[in-house]
């Protein structure tokens, strides 16, 4: 349930509504938008909403019928914008994240970061704990890898994105990482999502391999229910019967999510297609469809990459793509820095 305050509501009115909600057994959470002030009633209770409509300062009371209350578009008067190192995701902004799949060495990350910096990349990605299908495949460098990418990022004025695998790793990630990524296999790791709800740091939540939109948004709800509203949804391809590409990129997720939710949605064309020559056209298509950003795998020498070299762009390819999507974005009312 949402209590929409009128534009002349005082702080006392808002406090009174919050206390009334809490007395009814709800958790009250206030959000201040440009157009309106909302008091969210968190919880499932059978109450008469007329009791709330009569309170001073209340404009209207709305019932949120979806299972995801905080992530629902109706729960907020405007799009959520998440800002990282001067890069914005959401509303009129489309942000860019780039970097290798895996942190392999200091020289590898530094060489890639230097190339990306020349293409105006301000957020670098890189995996230190790698979820691999085979237990015998390279699993990442662990904390040493996070130290490397943090050092390189600081030298080049970048922020760091890396994937967290388990709630037990949270303390380590908080030391080195600016944006925590939840991978597709962990989308419904609810213990991890609850812990991420307690931090004040952006979270990229990737869609599960076979997850519905509602299941995806419910996972976001777990994070937001803990108090962390800095959630970026990431479509990274879903599993279908088609084997030509690694996964099937669901670009229809962009308009669907924008109708259902106020949260920003970005696209990962690298994991979605698994093929370097498919990454560029799908990136252009995603921007044209109105996504709020891209996360793209780029390696300074993909032919020698320890992981996912086939889907990683060469730096010169990324630079060309950057120039192309900069031209496309304004057509759909987006700005790319």
Image (cartoon, helix red, strand yellow):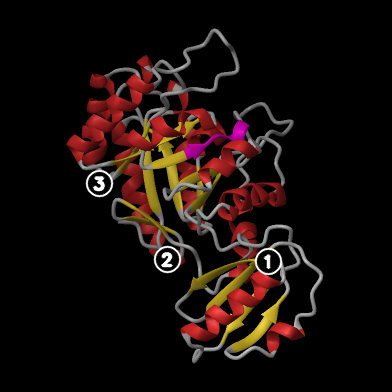
- The residue indicated by pointer 2 is 92
- The residue indicated by pointer 3 is 120
| Element class at badge 1 | loop
Q: Which mark is residue 50?
A: none
Mark 2 touches mark 3? (CB < 8 Å) = no
> Looking at the image, which residue is at 37% across and 22% down?
143
For label 1, the crowd category at 10 Å Cα-Cα, with few meaning under 14, some 14 to 19 and many 20 or more, is some
Picture layout, residue 265 above or below residue 243 = below
The magenta stretch is: 181-187
- The residue indicated by pointer 1 is 26
Q: Is 29 covered by the magenta stretch?
A: no
Q: Which quarter of the image is occupied by the N terminus? A: bottom right
Mark 1 touches mark 2? (CB < 8 Å) = no
* Residue 187 visible here: no
Q: Which quarter of the image is occupied by the C terminus? A: bottom left
Residue 70, by quadrant, is bottom right
């Amino acid at each position: 349930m949402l209590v929409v305050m009128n534009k002349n509501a005082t702080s006392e009115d808002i406090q009174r509504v919050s206390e009334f909600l809490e007395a009814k057994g709800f958790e009250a959470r206030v959000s201040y938008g440009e157009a309106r002030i909302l008091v969210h009633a968190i919880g499932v209770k059978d109450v008469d909403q007329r009791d709330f409509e009569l309170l001073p300062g209340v404009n209207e009371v709305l019932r949120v019928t979806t299972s995801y209350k905080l992530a629902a578009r109706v729960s907020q008067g405007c799009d959520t914008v998440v800002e990282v190192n001067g890069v914005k995701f959401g509303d009129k902004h489309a942000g860019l994240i780039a970097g290798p799949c895996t942190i392999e060495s200091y020289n590898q990350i530094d060489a890639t970061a230097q190339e990306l910096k020349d293409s105006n990349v301000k957020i670098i990605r890189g995996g230190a704990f790698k979820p691999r299908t085979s237990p015998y495949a390279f699993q990442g460098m662990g904390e040493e890898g996070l130290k490397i990418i943090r050092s390189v990022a600081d030298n080049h004025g970048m922020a760091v994105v890396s994937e967290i695998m388990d709630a037990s790793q949270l303390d380590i990630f908080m030391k080195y990482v600016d944006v925590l990524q939840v991978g597709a296999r962990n989308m419904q790791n609810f213990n991890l999502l609850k812990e991420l709800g307690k931090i004040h740091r952006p979270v990229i939540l990737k869609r599960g391999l076979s997850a519905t939109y509602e299941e995806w948004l419910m996972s976001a709800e777990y994070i937001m229910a803990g108090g962390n509203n800095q959630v970026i949804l990431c479509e990274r391809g879903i599993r279908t019967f088609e084997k030509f590409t690694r996964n099937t990129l669901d670009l229809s997720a962009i308009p669907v999510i924008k109708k259902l939710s106020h949260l920003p949605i970005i696209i990962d064309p690298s994991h979605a297609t698994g093929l370097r020559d498919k990454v560029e056209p799908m990136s252009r298509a995603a921007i044209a469809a109105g996504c709020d950003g891209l996360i793209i795998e780029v390696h300074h020498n993909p032919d020698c990459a320890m992981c996912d070299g086939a889907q990683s762009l060469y730096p010169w390819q990324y630079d060309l793509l950057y120039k192309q999507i900069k031209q496309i974005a304004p057509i759909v009312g987006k700005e790319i820095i």
